[in-house]
Amino acid sequence: MDACVYGSPSGARDAAVIALGYGAGLRRTEIAGLSLGDLHSEGDGMVVRVLGKGAKERLVHLDDGAAEAIADYIEVRGEQPGALLWSAPKGGKLNAGAGMSDEAVAVILKKQATRAGVQKLSP
């Protein structure tokens, strides 16, 4: 998480991607397929509705760290409906409304892992 450039829109997005993958255990395709409407508050926490393999739906409770990373990203992203995670060209500005592919999620994870000095990663 520290490898993400905090303060930039794409850094906040990258931290959210890591939080969903590592903190919530989502597959990269599941991460890419999320919309803002899939997030829900539940008590003091946050829950994400995920469509997994075989179009099976499940609810995943986010731990505090993952929920915080998502909330920080939504502050940058805004409340516009649609894809949760937006693409970003070089420079860090988000493409409002433009979702991401599962390959883009893998690229983000590999890039941030390299920045953090992680030797082996399988997104």
Image (cartoon, grey):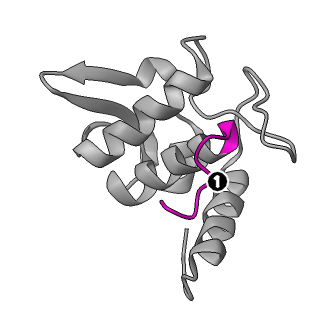
Q: Residues within 10 Å of mark 1 (few under 14, many from 20)?
A: many
Please state which of residues 90 and 6 is positioned toward the viewer in this rendering: 6
Residue drawn at the location 31% of the way across and 21% of the way down:
40
Q: Taken as a whole, is the magenta stretch helix, strand or loop? A: loop
- The residue that mark 1 highlights is 105
Q: Is residue 81 magenta?
A: no
Q: Quadrant of residue 118?
A: bottom right
How far across and down, in percent of the image, does residue 15 sit?
Answer: 52, 50
- Judging from the image, what secondary structure is the residue with disc 1 in? helix
Does 2 appear above or below 36?
A: below
What is the magenta range?
1-10
Q: Amino acid at mark 1?
A: Val
Position of residue 33 measured from the top left corner of the image (x, y, whole percent): 57, 37
Q: Residue 107, how many percent across, how many down? A: 71, 62
For residue 93, above or below residue 35 = below
The structure residue drawn at horizontal position 54% and vertical position 78%, both measured from the top left corner, is 121
- Residue drawn at (59%, 41%) of the image: 13
For the residue pair 49 and 21, the one nearer the viewer reads as: 21
Res 76 → quadrant: top right
